[in-house]
Amino acid sequence: MSLHPSSPEAVVQRQLDAYNARDIEAWLATYAEDAQQFEHPAQLVASGHAEMRARTGPRFTEPNLHARLIQRSVMGNVVIDHEEVTRTFPEGPGRIELVCIYQVHGGKIRTGSFVFGEKTLEPQR
């Protein structure tokens, strides 16, 4: 069964694919112009495309950046992803688990709220 392109699940999948492709323009295109991102439950970390680009753009240069979807739940216009993200943190390469809660309206992500797990750094050689 294929998803309608503007379905919440399809929009969030495009966002994940663009993130893994490190394509900031395609990634931002999945978000409404005035979308907001939060550290769950309510700490605003970015509002609108300019702030989202400034916050997320630099990580798109990390050579190991990759988000692996562990589980996805969809309820109406809410999509909840459990992911493991590999990236290069200031203290070195590693992984972090995230729960991402997206609200999608009109084919765009309006809000993203993120629950951050513990960072696990790769052993230094």
Image (cartoon, grey):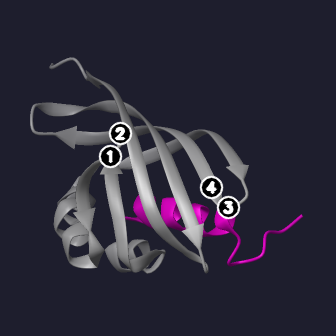
Residue 91 placement (x, y as % from top left): 10, 31
In the image, what residue occupies the spot 44% across and 62% down?
Answer: 111
What residue is shown with label 1? Answer: 42
Outermost front residue: 42
Q: Decide which of tag 1 and tag 4 comes sooner along the chain.
A: 1
Q: Decide which of tag 1 and tag 2 comes sooner along the chain.
A: 1
Name the residue type under label 1. Answer: Ala
Q: Residues within 10 Å of mark 3 (few under 14, many from 20)?
A: many
The Cα–Cα distance between marks 1 and 2, rounded to whole angstroms, is 25 Å
Residue 49 is left or right of residue 125, and the answer is right
Looking at the rendered structure, the secondary structure element under dot 3 is helix
Where the C terminus falls, by quadrant? top left
Asked if labels 2 and 3 touch by Cβ distance under 8 angstroms, the answer is no
Looking at the rendered structure, the secondary structure element under dot 4 is strand
Q: Decide which of tag 3 and tag 1 comes sooner along the chain.
A: 3
Q: Residues within 10 Å of mark 2 (few under 14, many from 20)?
A: many
Identify the magenta region.
1-23
In the image, what residue occupies the spot 50% across and 65% down?
Answer: 15
Residue 102 placement (x, y as % from top left): 52, 56
How many numbered discs, if any? Answer: 4
Asked if labels 1 and 3 touch by Cβ distance under 8 angstroms, the answer is no
